[in-house]
Image (spheres, rainbow, N blue to C red):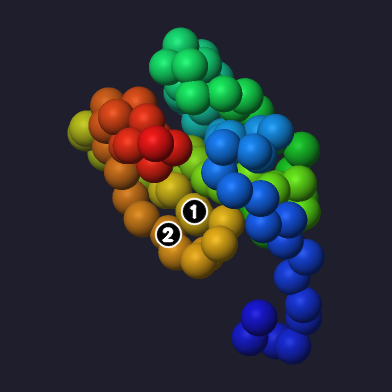
Amino acid sequence: MPNGETRLVLKLKKHLSPVKVAVIPLKRNNEQIVTLAHQIKEDLLKTGIGRVMLEDSGNIGKAYRRHDEIGTPICITVDFESIEQSPATVTLRNRDTMAQERVAVADLPKYLKEFFL
């Protein structure tokens, strides 16, 4: 990491991870963001990809680190852009590469099914 900190990561293969996806609302006291996060979680549970967790315990950086430590391969962040843009988009963060990309909410089920193949 840039500031000399080390990152603890449980690098399980995707299919072995106990939590497949974490949905993280950026601001837990913003009703629109939290509502969209809950909706995304429910929609992803219907895809059958595995356990999807809503992580609303606080700071986004701490949430990422917590999910790195338990081996969650993908974190989805619901932020202000998610509720302001049409179509709605979210940020996907890959545990192994730490790469982030914007994906339309409507495309999430297809994207994640292909990711976990």
Q: Residues within 10 Å of mark 1 (few under 14, many from 20)?
A: many
Q: Where 50 sits versus 10, above or below?
A: above
Q: Write the residue at 66% across / 34% down.
A: 19
Q: Write the residue at 70% across / 33% down.
A: 18
The dot on residue 50 is none
The answer to whether residue 38 is visible is yes
Q: Where does residue 74 sit, x and y in percent of width and height?
A: 53, 45
Q: How crowded is mark 2: few (under 14 residues within 10 Å), some or many (20 or more)?
A: some
Q: Quadrant of residue 69?
A: bottom right
Tell me whether circle 2 and circle 1 mark residues in contact (CB < 8 Å). Answer: yes
Q: In which quarter of the image is residue 72?
A: top right
Q: Write the residue at 49% across / 53% down.
A: 93
Image quadrant holding the C terminus, namely top left
The dot on residue 93 is 1
5 on left or right of 71: right
Residue, far left: 86
Q: Write the residue at 77% across / 81% down.
A: 5
Q: Where 111 sits versus 48, above or below?
A: below
Q: How many marks?
A: 2
Q: Where 2 sits versus 17, above or below?
A: below
Q: Quadrant of residue 1?
A: bottom right
Helix, strand or loop status at disc 2: strand
The dot on residue 100 is 2
What amino acid is found at the position of numbered circle 2 in the picture? Answer: Gln
Q: Where does residue 34 sit, x and y in percent of width and height?
A: 56, 26
Q: Where does residue 103 sit, x and y in percent of width and height?
A: 31, 43
Estimate the spatial distance between the alpha carbons at disc 2 and disc 1, rounded to whole Å.
Answer: 4 Å
Pick the front one: 15 or 91: 15
The answer to whether residue 31 is visible is no
First in sequence: mark 2 vs mark 1: 1
Pick the front one: 21 or 76: 21
